[in-house]
Image: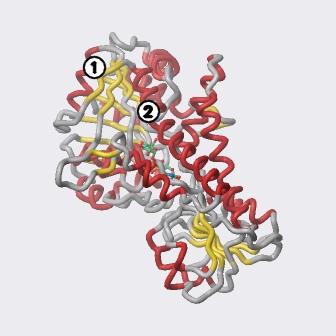
């Protein structure tokens, strides 16, 4: 089929590259000419495992990029909208989605053949059938469900493994205004055999996406709350507690004579310094805001956000057990990306941690193996180290924020030293360091200190 995709962010580009790999002819559209040129030159504008290979294999063959939206819409049967939906005061800003729908509508005005407009951006339930529909109908002078199709097909891509997630999806959710839209979307995904499909209306498809992310975020905050209780009790380690919880039959599959297989949702039951990224914080906030707008209280979503907002304070409190004043203390923050294997800094817990340490007067160094922040407002006055070794020079304390595999070298690099290690992800062996504190664990002692 001939497909077009508006927006070449990580969702739009991954979708485009993967659908081209499946044999479709795909045109990726972006207003940013330099990004379009880069993609046409076979260079990936973002760091995503497997993307460079798929891009170079398909570009110029089944995949091209352009700034010419009208042409791309004319030459395709389906257009996906995959533009950003930034958060403004907790609500999502639909400006770009609305503008994209209007532009596609404009192009549909003089298009003779049937076309389906499909929203892929994460949008608040109800958006496709209201904002997007209105915008496209007004610009095209046509009617959704009669003259053109209108669908909603949320993505379930995890950054860092987005290509793998797209290639081997666990489910495909296909929202549509009518049967014809469902049929078109079925044809797009025809080669994904054996994958469960949920055919539904547009608002349900939108809600599935929000409910899925809210569940993950709630599980993380739940574990972090248990972690706080564990460290307050003393000698109770949240890692052991959750290992015990993970063994529940609810979270494992067992076959006689085989090792139990843990459900991957259990990986959202690990204590840490909180969730970040472009999806979880924004989606939970936006859903709670919609509840407020509808007059429906959302105490669970609110609590999920509240616990998360408090996790950076937990890290600072662990440091303060060893340094009653952090003024002039040399602290190294390890990890800036919101999670490993990505260079994405959006809503990373590293920044609230850095802000708190800076206002306490600490002298800060930061290191991330891949993320290269330029002029980030929270990094003013922070020394950016060029390597893990470099970041440790002169450090009195190290705070691990992101679970990068490279940080497993810390025991070796800090062998014999008294540098305090604060483990914000519970990935290090606490017995490997002279001084250690970790989220969700505290040795019960009269002094209350590990040292
Ligand atoms: C998330 C979802 O996992 C995807 O299913 C969804 O499609 C995507 O959002 C989206 O809406 O597009 P992503 O934000 O890329 O994916 O990253 P996750 O791996 O889910 O991590 C989110 C945050 O939670 C990270 O900051 C991570 O460090 C944190 N986390 C995760 C914890 O703090 N504890 C855990 O136990 C697990």
Residue 39 lies left or right of residue 259; in this view the side is right
How many tags in the picture? 2
Instruction: Give the camera-side residue of 431 and 325.
Output: 431
Q: Residue 15: where, in percent of width, then height?
A: 33, 43
> Label 2, label 1: how many angstroms apart (C-alpha)?
28 Å
Q: Which of marks 1 and 2 precedes in the sequence? A: 1
Residue 353 lies left or right of residue 263; in this view the side is right
Residue 415 lies left or right of residue 77; in this view the side is right
Does residue 282 sit above or below 446 in this rendering?
Answer: above
Say which residue appears at 41% left-offset and 48% top-offset. 266
Is the Cβ of the residue at disc 2 closer than 8 Å to that at disc 1?
Answer: no
Instruction: Give the camera-side residue of 431 and 150.
Output: 431
Q: Circle 2 sits in a helix, a strand or a loop, which is it?
A: helix
Say which residue appears at 54% left-offset and 87% top-offset. 415
Q: Circle 1 sits in a helix, a strand or a loop, which is it?
A: loop
Q: Residue furthest bottom?
A: 416
Q: Residue 340: where, in percent of width, then height?
A: 47, 62
Say which residue appears at 81% left-offset and 65% top-offset. 360
Check the picture and name the quadrant holding the N terminus: top left
Q: Is mark 2 within 8 Å of ligand 1?
A: yes
Q: Mark 2, mark 1: which one is toward the viewer?
A: 2
Q: Residue 181: where, in percent of width, then height?
A: 29, 20
Say which residue appears at 23% left-offset and 57% top-offset. 57
Circle on res. 209 = 2
Q: Residue 392: where, in percent of width, then height?
A: 61, 82
Does residue 248 sit above or below 97 in this rendering?
Answer: below
- Which residue matches tag 1? 114
């Amino acid at each position: 089929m001939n497909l077009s995709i508006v927006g070449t962010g990580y969702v739009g580009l991954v979708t485009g590259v993967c659908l081209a790999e499946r044999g479709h002819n795909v045109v990726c559209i972006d207003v940013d000419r330099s990004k379009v040129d880069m993609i046409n030159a076979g260079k990936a504008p973002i760091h995503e495992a497997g993307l460079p290979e798929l891009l170079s294999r398909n570009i110029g063959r089944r995949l091209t990029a352009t700034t010419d939206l009208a042409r791309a819409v004319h030459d395709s049967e389906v257009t996906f909208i995959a533009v950003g939906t930034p958060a403004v005061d907790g609500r999502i800003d639909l400006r770009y989605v609305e503008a994209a729908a209007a532009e596609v509508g404009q192009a549909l005005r003089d298009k003779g053949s049937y076309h389906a407009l499909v929203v892929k951006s994460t949008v608040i339930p109800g958006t496709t059938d209201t904002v997007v529909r209105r915008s496209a109908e007004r610009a095209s002078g046509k009617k959704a469900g009669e003259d053109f199709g209108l669908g909603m097909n949320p993505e379930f891509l995890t950054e860092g493994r987005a290509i793998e997630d797209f290639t081997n999806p666990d489910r495909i959710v296909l929202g549509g205004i009518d049967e014809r839209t469902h049929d078109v979307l079925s044809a797009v995904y025809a080669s994904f055999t054996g994958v469960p499909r949920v055919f539904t209306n547009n608002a349900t498809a939108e809600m599935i996406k929000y409910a899925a992310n809210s569940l993950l975020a709630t599980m993380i905050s739940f574990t972090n709350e248990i972690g706080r209780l564990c460290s307050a009790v003393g000698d109770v380690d949240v890692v052991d507690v959750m290992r015990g919880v993970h063994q529940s039959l609810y979270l494992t599959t067992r076959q006689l004579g085989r090792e139990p297989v843990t459900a991957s949702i259990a990986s959202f039951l690990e204590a840490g310094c909180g969730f970040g990224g472009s999806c979880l914080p924004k989606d939970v906030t936006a859903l709670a805001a919609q509840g407020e707008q509808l007059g429906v209280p959302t105490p669970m979503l609110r609590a999920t956000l509240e616990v998360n907002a408090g996790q950076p304070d937990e890290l600072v409190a662990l440091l303060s057990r060893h340094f009653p004043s952090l003024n002039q203390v040399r602290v190294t923050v390890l990890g800036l990306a919101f999670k490993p294997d990505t260079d994405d800094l959006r809503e990373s817990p590293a920044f609230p941690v850095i802000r708190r340490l800076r206002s306490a007067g600490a002298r800060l160094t930061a290191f991330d193996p891949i993320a290269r922040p330029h002029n980030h407002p929270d990094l003013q006055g922070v020394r950016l180290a060029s390597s893990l070794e470099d970041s440790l020079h002169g450090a009195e304390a190290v705070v691990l924020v992101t679970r990068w595999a490279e940080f497993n070298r810390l025991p070796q690099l800090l062998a014999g030293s008294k540098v305090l290690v604060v483990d914000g992800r519970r990935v290090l062996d606490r017995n490997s360091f002279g001084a250690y504190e970790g989220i969700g664990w505290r040795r019960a002692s009269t002094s209350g200190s590990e040292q």
